[in-house]
Amino acid sequence: MPITQPVPVFNRLITALPDLERQRFLASCEPVTLSFGEVLATPDAPLLHVYFPTQSFICQTTTINGASRLGVLLAGDEGMLGISLILGLNLSNLHASVLGPGQALRMETRQFCRELDLSVAWHRLLQRYLYVMMGQLAQTATCNRFHLLEARLARWLLMAQDRAHSDQFHATHEFLARTLGVRRVGITKAASMLQNRKLISYHRGDIKILDRYGLEASACSCFCSDNSLYTQIMQSA
């Protein structure tokens, strides 16, 4: 049976700040509603805002040969968009767009940099988050090379569900093919196998998770590795 997860009120990174610093930080944030497909960052362009999803999630992709895009990261309420600023770089090396529409907190880049200067806690926390992102990138590279497409697709669907905090979300065959770096026919076959086993339903890009436990059993070990890394590093902050 599908599991409906509670929708978070805050972004987990912000929640992890000490009370006084969190209150000061939130006072400079602007609540925004992100729309499906909205572009938030493009490669080598200055970042105008930093985003902290609360009820939305962002897909980050890298461009190959100036055209094709390969999905490398998802950021939901556990993360943020704009981590390069912790390194003193006001640039994105990835394309970022909204995959899960909904609420987020937004802050101007200059204000965020001022907050970094004021807060040792922010530096320590975001250094840990950067480490987690590096680990997830390495895990994704390994996953793309060694694991079967059906298991990779199950992993991605679980990641999306966790960030959507819903059993239902939207992702077309074409998008999934680009994200996982395969041909569209491969996604069609893998999704059909998951659907035939009644783990998901899939119709014109509308995905519904029917059996979370079954999907976890079908996913590769990378899904658990990602979650374990986040828990280990972020909860010890």
Image: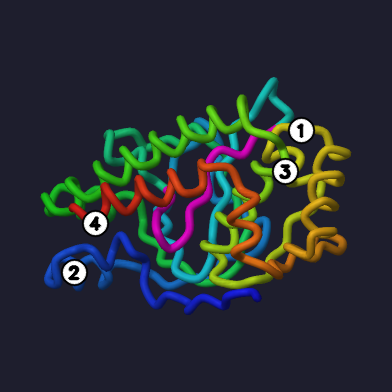
Instruction: Answer left or right for 143 relative to 229.
Output: right
Question: Circle 3 sits on which residue?
Answer: 150
C-alpha gap between disc 4 and disc 2:
22 Å
Disc 1 marks a residue whose amino acid type is Val
Callout 2 amino acid? Arg
Q: Is residue 132 above or below residue 98?
A: above
**Label for residue 47?**
none
Q: Picture coordinates of residue 98 (x, y %)?
A: 60, 56
Q: Are marks 4 and 2 in contact (CB under 8 Å)?
A: no
Magenta highlight range: 69-81
Q: Residue at x 61, y 25 (%)?
A: 145
Q: Nearer the viewer, mark 2 or mark 1?
A: 1
Q: CA distance from mark 3 to mark 4?
A: 31 Å
Q: Earlier in the sequence, mark 1 or mark 3?
A: 3
Return the disc, 4 or 2, that comes first in the chain's sequence. Answer: 2
Q: Secondary structure at mark 3?
A: helix
Q: Circle 2 — which element?
A: helix
Residue at mark 4:
235
Nearer the camera: disc 4 or disc 2: 4
On the image, the x and y values in percent for residue 72 come to 55, 38
- Tag 4's secondary structure? loop
Q: Is residue 144 left or right of residue 136?
A: right
Give the residue number, with chain letter if any, for mark 1.
182
Q: CA distance from mark 2 to mark 3?
A: 45 Å
